[in-house]
Image (cartoon, rainbow, N blue to C red):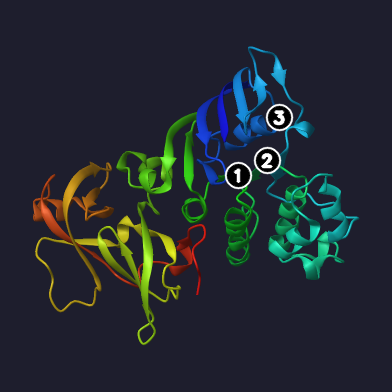
Amino acid sequence: MLRMDVRHQAGEFSLEAAFEAPAGSITAIFGQSGAGKTTLINLIAGLSSPAEGQIVCGGVTLFNSENGVNVPPERRRIGYVFQEGRLFPHMDVRRNLAYGYKEGSMLAFEQITELLDLGSLLARRPDTLSGGERQRVAIGRALLSNPALLLMDEPLASIDAQRRGEILPFIERLRDELSISIVYVSHAIDEVIRLADSMVLLSGGRVAAVGGVEELMSRLDLFPLTGRFEAGAVLAATCRGYDREYGLAELAFQGGILRVAGAELAVGTEVRVHIRARDVSLMLNRPEMTSVLNIFEGRVVEIAETGSPQVDVRLDIGSPLIARITRKSMHDLKLREGVKLHALVKAVAIDRRSLSATAASPRA
């Protein structure tokens, strides 16, 4: 487990952060530009020192201002993957990987090259690799340093959307197969939803919230920080079946069955599903003869004004669900807390690429 409680001053910017990151999981540090994300993980890595506080990783004190403890970066057993990869241009991939290797590493060279699919790249130079390939090499080099904790500072920020989709499964494999603790910095909420087990939400150098992804994404008060455009609920579900004739996955969750178009998953796969608030419609009476396949009964739990013609409505359908509707619709439906209604979610509205399989789940 990583545990930190620090105060830090850098020019006019101040950072105060206290949280715990569970062992063997991915903890996302999320926030907009300037929130203090990189400053925070540089303190963990030892590249900067807090003004006061403490940092403990795996039971080992890395920093304690009261006791005068400040372990040098090279002795912290922390791997660091930067945005750009930072590979040595004069070395081929094999030598870049070998540079990170430390005696006593629990991970073998062959294991890492297989896990990250680097075997065909070993003889190539960094300038011949794609952005995604370079980042895979950078991750491999960091893992071969035998880290107790892996820090990843927006590793996909400089990679285009297609390449980003290619590298995400490799990061999931680190979680699933190596059970290594990862602190993952990002300002892209879709990455956080797919990868993270828990998240630390930073704003202006302060921790605004800490908790599970599903919990924090369902809080209306955090939408200004998590991003209004992609705001919505995150559900934990299990694949109950796949209709090959119509290409529909049936995902069971506490609120019922969610049908998703084009998501071919193995039965038993546990997934996390992001349903955007703007893709949820509301009706007081159950609709008949509609093209919408997902209809859930529920009640209004909370309504949040947004200072615009829109409002956010949190529903209880057995699990939290968020709908974004106009203020006029709220008025016409006479919505208030406790009102019973039906929520409609189109099967084609859910991006199958955003489905996140949880650890140890089978895939098709």
**Point 29% across, 70% down: residue:** 346
- Confirm whether residue 12 shows in the render: no
Q: Residue under label 2, please give it.
A: 148
Q: Position of residue 215 (x, y in %)?
A: 36, 44
Residue 334's tag is: none
Numbered disc 1: secondary structure: strand
Assess disc 1: are there few (<14), some (14-19) or many (≥20) residues with their C-alpha within 10 Å of its C-alpha: many
Tag 1 or tag 3, which sits nearer the N-term? Answer: 3
Q: How many marks?
A: 3
Where disc 3 sits, the SS reads loop
Distance CA(mark 3)–CA(mark 1) = 17 Å
Of the residues shown, which amino acid type is indicated by label 3?
Answer: Gly
Q: Could you tell me residue 203's position as x and y percent?
A: 47, 34
Residue under pointer 3:
46
Which image quadrant is residue 283 in?
bottom left
Q: Specify whether 359 is left or right of 312.
A: right
- Residue under the point 72% across and 50% down: 84
Mark 3 in CB contact with mark 2 (< 8 angstroms) = no
Label 2–label 1 contact, CB within 8 A: yes
**In the structure shown, which secondary structural element does the residue marked by tag 2 occupy?**
loop
Q: Nearer the viewer, residue 311 or 121?
A: 121
The reply, left or right, for residue 93 in relation to residue 330 is: right
Q: Say which amino acid is labelled 1.
A: Ser
Callout 2: 10 Å neighbours few (<14), some, many (20+)?
A: some
Tell us which disc is closer to us: 3 or 2.
2
State the separation of the CA atoms marked 2 and 1: 7 Å
The location of residue 267, given as percent across then percent down, is: 41, 72
Q: Which residue is mark 1?
A: 181
Relative vertical location of residue 292 with respect to residue 283 in this rendering, above or below: below
The disc, 3 or 2, on the residue closer to the chain's N-terminal end is 3
Residue at 71% across, 61% down: 131
